[in-house]
Amino acid sequence: MINESAEMDNRVSIRPFEDQVSPESYHFLGNIVEKNDLDLRQYSDKVTNELNHMVTSLLENCISLSKESGNLYQHLNLAENSLQSLQNILQSSEIELKGVVNEVGYIKDKTNSINYYLKNVKLLETEVSNYIETLCLHPELIINLANGPIDSSYISNLNQFELFIDKIEKKEFLQSKALKDLTPEIEKLKHRITGRVRNHLIVILEQLKKPRTNIGIIQQNVLMKWKPLFLFLKNRNGSVFQEILNIYFEIMNTIYAGYFQAYVKQIAKFPYEIYSQNDLISEDGLENNLKSKSMIFVLGERLKIVENKDEEPIVCHSIIQKTLKGNLKIENIFKSINGLLINALVSEYLCVSKLFDIPLKDVAQHFNLIFSLPLNLSLTWFNDYVNKTYDFFGLLIISLINQNNKKYLSSANFPLLNHYLEKIENIIWPKIQSLLDFHIQSMQISNLNLIKC
């Protein structure tokens, strides 16, 4: 069969070459034959056989390739079918995915809507909870405020009640129907608390009236402890708070007046006047007067009291020592009294501001309610003394002390005693003028020849 195929291949494949090759083309073969004594027919057969073998090999390869091509074509068809099927699947999946995306979007929108709803529910829950808590007071707290003992726990409960009042007074609660129903009960409780607090504070303030009471200790250790009660009245019932203020001011006014009277009474037991009306007013016995009283018109160390601005007020037991040593003079008494008044003023000024939570600039309007009696008593005492005294130098020194007090209060921003200090000046200077005229007149009627330089 191979030979038949070879012969067929010869007929098919060689003749075209024979047609294309001319006889002249074989001349080189003659040259080869002549040189090598080669048998051309034999050589031709050999070449023919090799060509046939090559053709046979090529045909076999072509047949093998054809089979492989067929298999490849089949595989390609299968692959194409698979790809087509995969494409269909992908298209179907794409449609399904679009549906899934739409569903996810819907679910997301629904979730956002639900979250928004839940957020609103939580906010509403918080608002309702706060609203309910705002409108609710614990029964134990109400019982304690209405009937319980007034102590530190009472102050804590009172603070909670004040927070409750602050909350319900906000705008968002003013139109609440529930609050309108509760308002009468709240007012009853507030009225009950106000009455109890008022009575308790009056009892506390009455402690200030006890004899030999240290006012400073009572103010710091007792009154300051009950400051929240004062502030409750100030914030919730202005008329009752003003009543408590007036009671406190009246008590302190009376106490300071009592202290001043007792102080002046003790001072009056000891002599402090060194001048008399006979000094340089009479021509009779002038020489003797000059010899016996030549030192009363010498200042000596009396001006030191003006320079010593930090000198403490005189207490009664030290008055005796100063009197025995001859050091007690009117300027010492004046400086001591006014020093006590100034110290009391500054201390009370700060105490009232702190205790009742009143700005310092607003305390001034209450000043006269606290110090009217002490200041009037001081002015009365000083006016009586000035009307009787002939101590010209003492009055001048008192004027200097008064000026120092003015400067001190002005620098400390306490101008509340300005009116009082001005009255002191108005009392002093007419008397100084009178004494100057008195001494000048005494010198005019005196025999100057009796005075030795």
Image (cartoon, grey):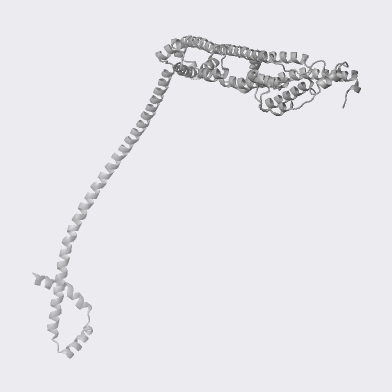
Question: Can residue 417 be seen at all in this image of the molecule?
Answer: no
Q: Quadrant of residue 247?
A: top right
Q: Position of residue 341 (x, y in %)?
A: 66, 19
Relative placement, left or right, of 388 versus 356 is right
Which residue is more in the foreground, 214 or 193? 214
Q: Quadrant of the C terminus?
A: top right
Q: Position of residue 123 (x, y in %)?
A: 41, 25
Relative placement, left or right, of 439 versus 78 is right
Residue 390 versus residue 122 in the image, above or below: above
Which residue is more in the foreground, 128 or 294? 294
Residue 31 versus residue 95 in the image, above or below: below
The residue located at (12%, 72%) in the rendering is: 6
Relative placement, left or right, of 416 versus 234 is right
Q: Position of residue 399 (x, y in %)?
A: 75, 23
Which residue is more in the foreground, 80 or 344? 344
Q: Position of residue 7 (x, y in %)?
A: 12, 73
Question: Can residue 317 be seen at all in this image of the molecule?
Answer: yes
Q: Quadrant of the N terminus?
A: bottom left
Question: In the displayed image of the protein, which residue is found farthest to the left?
Answer: 1
Query: Could you tell me how many numbered marks the image carries?
Result: 0
Q: Quadrant of residue 210?
A: top right
